[in-house]
Image: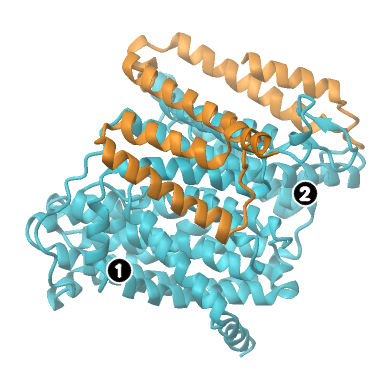
Amino acid sequence: MVSALAITAEAGRLGFGTFGRPGPGFLPFLAGTCLSVLAGVGLIQTVVQKPAAAAGGGFHAADILRIGLVSAVLFIYVFLWDIIGFPASTFLLLLFLFRCVEPLRWRTVFVAAGLTLAFTYILFSVLLGARLPAGRLWTYFIS
Amino acid sequence: MDLFYQLISGFAVAFQPVNLFYCFLGCLIGTLVGVLPGLGPTAAMALLLPATFHVAPVTAIIMLAGIYYGAMYGGSTTSILVNIPGEAASVMTCLDGYQMARQGRAGAALGMSAFASFIAGTLGLVGLTLLAPPLAVFALKFGPPEYFSLMCMGMVVLSFLTGASMIHSLMMACFGIIIGTVGTDTVSGSTRFTFGLTELMDGVGLVPLVMGLFGISEIILNLEQNVDRDVFKAKVKGLLPTLEDWVQAKWALMRGTMIGFWLGILPGGGAVLSSFVAYAVEKRFSKQPERFGTGMIEGVAAPEAANNAAAQSAFIPLLTLGLPANVVMALLLGALILHGVTPGPLLLTKHPEIFWGVVASMYLGNAMLLVLNLPLIGLWVQLLRIPYPYLMPAVVLFCIVGSYSVANSITDVYLMLGFGIFGYLMKKLKFDSPPLVLAFVLGPLIEYYFKSSLMFSRGSFAVFFTRPISLVCLVITGVIFLSSIISALRRRSPGLLPK
């Protein structure tokens, strides 16, 4: 609801315009207002509902930890693209995913990570022509 | 006769080697995606969208469409052999398909599923071929108010049908519209919700949004569930259903096709809903409803026919009105726009090669899928035996690199990861993603038609209520909206409203 109100306020700042000449904030303002109203109704429903019925899908501490860890690793992985480049960071990510999410033997982990990296690199970089980051670190050493 | 010549010209396009190859590739990937639980057709299409930028629009749509209807075929294999739906539209096939497999009739179930899919898919295509051209002519009468009202109706119907809570679905739709407005406003040139980031000036990309909401979020969700797949061990044999099977299933197949075809056209209908409705109708029509769920061939034929007919008929509103009936069609709409083609009534006259080429390729694709799904069934069974820990890292990597390769932008990857976490939280809190994606794709169009209508009427809202087509759409929207409020009130306080 707070987000919806913030969106509505920002949309109002963009300029509502007139009905005959709607401005850039016209639709975001309407959508933000609807979102605020719906969020308000949802909030009232949650408060009025019995606790058992209001309970959501359920978050467990162990799951949150594992999901939080994987999400953080993914963000760090993308951050590392620019520094150590796509191949090195991807190999490290794959080692983590193959080993830590569902523990596999180290030899399997290395082979699976190497094969997955090779397949992805050939598919996206060689066949589809994507410019995957080489990494500033290596260019620094080379130059 | 004109229709026949146009269809022939479509086959000339579809038979070009490059289109034939991409059609086969789409069907193959679709079957693969359908067979493997975890990555649905929407995520697969978003993942492969960047790969289509190098080919002609018709080739791109042929491949993406192939993934969609291919997944409908493939999903049943997992349902029958593992009792896990390969994708959402195959949920109902689990009930009787898996029981048939346990009774030693896996081959008959797989065979009936493939034949029902083929027959319903082909009949759905005949309906598409016959219905689309007159509908496109009718749609020429539509102006901005009609399109605005039609799109509003589509979003409300989808919100009504998809989620458990209409409020949650409408909130997601509003949020989708807001995400769709991020970037530079094409009329005034001012930037909206960019937080000063130049990377957001062009708006949020469709691929990062869909990959995050449907790919990454699904993987995060699977991290907290054990994805154990107990694949049916016995050898699959006797793929051709017996004459008795055909006699038992013929009307179920026909009814499933009809239900799927008409529900597929409706906004929010689509393959999932049709398979549920077809199964329920079949159970009601049956003389032995109590035997459903114990291995009845009708319980396989009806939902499989329905989801495949719906997968074909969903193209009718997209190609003739430019209105996506479900989230997959919204993705196809986005793909067409990215390729510089605007779907709608003028598609048939301005780009007949795209319209008829795609339709003709779907006839060919259906035949290819029959070959892929029957003689190659052993291959798909082997694929099902690949452990999930081997697949998950590859899927994560494909999502990340796929969203990066659209514009070689790291911001897109961060956005995708953000949407992935957002999508996971929304799934846990029982908010559905399809209304968000549909609203995101339709948002800019809704804004354009809404502003055009108001400028045309000099600021009078009466323009939406004085034009008959627009009025009908708005009345339907209002009725659906009111009925959902009344049913919610009834559920909450049974004595409050009379029945």
Q: Residue at x 63, y 84 (%)?
A: B6
Q: Residue A26 at x, y = what percent? A: 81, 31
The x, y position of residue B38, in whole percent, is 36, 44
**Residue B43: where, in percent of width, then height?**
49, 47
**Secondary structure at numbered mark 2:** helix
> Which label lies toward us, 1 or 2?
1
- Per the image, the residue denoted by label 2 is B145
Disc 1 residue type (three-letter): Asn
Residue name at image x 38 percent, y 31 percent? A96
Indicate which disc residue B373 carries. Answer: 1
Callout 2 crowding tier (Cα within 10 Å): few <14, some 14–19, many ≥20: many
- Chain letter for mark 1, please: B
Residue at image x 66%, y 42%? B205
Secondary structure type for disc 1: helix
Residue B249, compared with residue A133, is above or below; it is: below
Q: Is residue B170 left or right of residue B309?
A: right
Question: Is residue B180 in sight in this rendering?
Answer: yes
Total of numbered circles in the picture? 2
- What is the chain letter for disc 2? B
Q: Give me the residue at 13% from left, 72% from top.
A: B238
Q: Nearer the viewer, residue B496 or A4?
A: A4
Q: Nearer the viewer, residue B381 or B134?
A: B381
Shown colour of chain A: orange
Q: Colour of chain B?
A: cyan
